[in-house]
Amino acid sequence: MTAPTPEPDFVATLRALLSAGRYRDVMTAWLGAPAAEARRSEAVLLAATASMRLGEVARAGELAAQAAEAFRQRADQDGRLRAVNLLGAVAFEQGALDDAMKQFETARGLARQLEDTLFEAHAANNLASVAHLRGDAATALSLYRAALLGYQRLGDRRGTTQTYHNLGLAFRELGAWQDADEATVQAVRHARLVEDAALAALAVTGRAELDLARGAIDVAARELDRADELARQAGDQLGIAEIRRVRAVASLQRNDAAAALVEAREGGTLAEEQGSALLAAECAAAEALALRRLARRGEAEDRRRKAADGFARLGAAALAERFSREWERPVS
């Protein structure tokens, strides 16, 4: 008599769905699981990771904190490493940069203790993003390159994609157009190989923003349409909000302030709903610029203060400086 095929382990099922980029399916399975299965710390961490990739920042933070505490109580350093790194990512999105840096540094230390080169690369990439946001370009580029080297050695395309995307942002803000072009091309290429719609949307959005900075508005518009399809396919609300912000920038370049206002407001609402302080501040900046062009001076000044206060709380020196320059330009 043939033995029955055993049921797949619940955690293994969640991990497979996560690896396939099926983040909404991860949450559906986790929410529908028996309590004993759903409470397993590894399952909670996988649900937290899926929530983060869906742009559900607040829920990701709650679940990651639960998992981190469970791993700490049973002295599971590997699990704690992964949970702490995710908590850092949540803190970064919420604008708590000091907490984010603390969590990422803790994660990097744990990774070195465990000789986990993958998570050491994750932590380096994340610390680079904090440095970049604070305007420390030299430190950011050094850490991004260290992370990229680690990912390439391991053959980790997801990490490679994210780091190339981040390098593209950093190079663009430095005006290093050739380096930015190469980085964004590589981000899109690796994202396609990963076959993750949310990750591909991120990479294509980064490419579109570079094209906007170079004045290729029509090219950027087509890329944003593609990124929007991918983000909606993945159910990535934060990705959709980011695309709306970039569409607002494109509309401003076309001198269509009314369209820019709609995009910036809808992007900001989504960003606030998902708990992203950084993206909410960026959308407020785009909204302020649109209102100023529409001669709605009181509303524009209100949005300007909101954006400036948001950047100040975040310590986002580079973004604050760029917004200040844009605000001071004469309205044509």
Image (cartoon, rainbow, N blue to C red):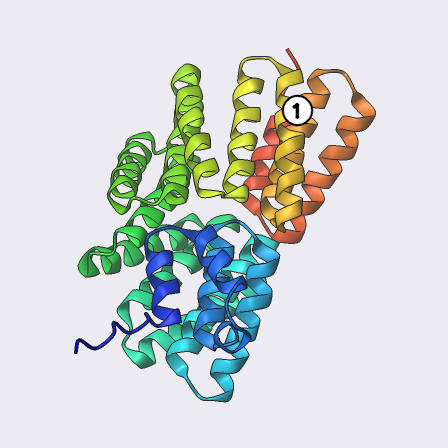
Q: Is residue 69 above or below residue 182?
A: below
Q: Residue at x 43, y 58 (%)?
A: 126
Q: Is residue 56 above or below residue 296?
A: below
Residue 211 vs residue 2, the one in the foreground: 2
Residue 219 at what x, y percent from top left? 38, 18
Q: How dense is the environment of label 1, judged by Cα within 10 Å: few (below 14), some, or many (20 and up)? A: some
Q: Is residue 297 above or below residue 60?
A: above
Q: What element does badge 1 sit on?
A: helix
In the rendered structure, the answer to whether residue 153 lies left or right of residue 47 reads: left
In the rendered structure, the answer to whether residue 304 lies left or right of residue 224 reads: right
User: Does residue 87 appear in this view?
Assistant: yes
Residue 227 at what x, y percent from top left? 42, 32
Residue 281 at what x, y percent from top left? 64, 41
User: Does residue 328 appear in this view?
Assistant: no
| Residue sitting at the far right | 298
Q: Residue at x 56, y 37 (%)?
A: 241
Please, what is the three-letter code of the amino acid marked with disc 1?
Val
Residue 77 vs residue 152, the one in the foreground: 77
Residue 307 at what x, y percent from top left? 68, 39
Q: Residue at x 72, y 22 (%)?
A: 291
Q: Where is mark 1, residue-wise?
A: 262
